[in-house]
Amino acid sequence: SSERDHDLRVDIVENIEEDYGMFVWPCSVILAEYVWQQRPRFSRSRVVELGAGTSLPGLVAAKVGAHVTLTDIAHNTEVLDNIQQICSLNNANCTVLGLTWGDWDEPVFDLHPDIILGADVLYDSASKLLIYSSWLAFLSLWLRHVSNMPLHLFW
């Protein structure tokens, strides 16, 4: 393997003064490293990142060849606009969707991902029940879709 096989550059726009979704959280760095280390599993996969924020894990997945949908809070246009800007900066052809925790009419539930990513999603105790219910609904749909696949990627 060449030295280029071990290099990856992702540019992120952060604003520490603003919303939670405007800066890179520690677990997203760890998840992005996992995606990079497991890149053969992610290549050509359909990936959804829930609560993407600055989208580091999803962007790494896109860079290794995954078809990625990045989601964050639907009413927070600043975060969604930042995700779009970060995708453009990185020449990443990702879909960006708003997702309201607890809302079942969101287009993200029509997706059939092979892999679901989420890092530091449970930061707000006030939204915990809505987040759990959305995760359970999404995972239920996902498990029906991948019933013929091994669950070794689910952790």
Image (spheres, rainbow, N blue to C red):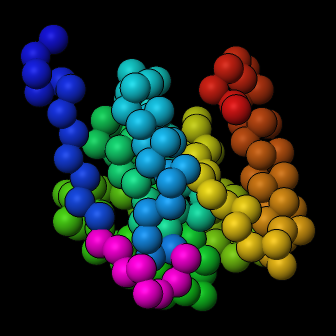
Is residue 16 rendered magenta in the image? yes
Near-viewer residue (123 or 40): 123
Q: Quadrant of residue 89?
A: bottom left
Boundaries of the magenta span: 13-20
- Seen at 52% across and 83% down, the residue is 19
Q: Is residue 123 above or below residue 77?
A: above
- Seen at 47% across and 87% down, the residue is 18
The quadrant the N terminus occupies is top left
Q: Is residue 84 visible?
A: yes
The quadrant the C terminus occupies is top right
Q: Is residue 90 above or below residue 46?
A: below
Residue 118 at x, y percent in the picture: 61, 51
Is residue 118 rendered magenta in the image? no
Q: Quadrant of residue 56?
A: bottom left
Residue 123 at x, y percent in the picture: 70, 67
Q: Is residue 97 visible?
A: no
Residue 101 at x, y percent in the picture: 75, 72
- Drawn side of residue 144 relative to residue 89, left or right: right
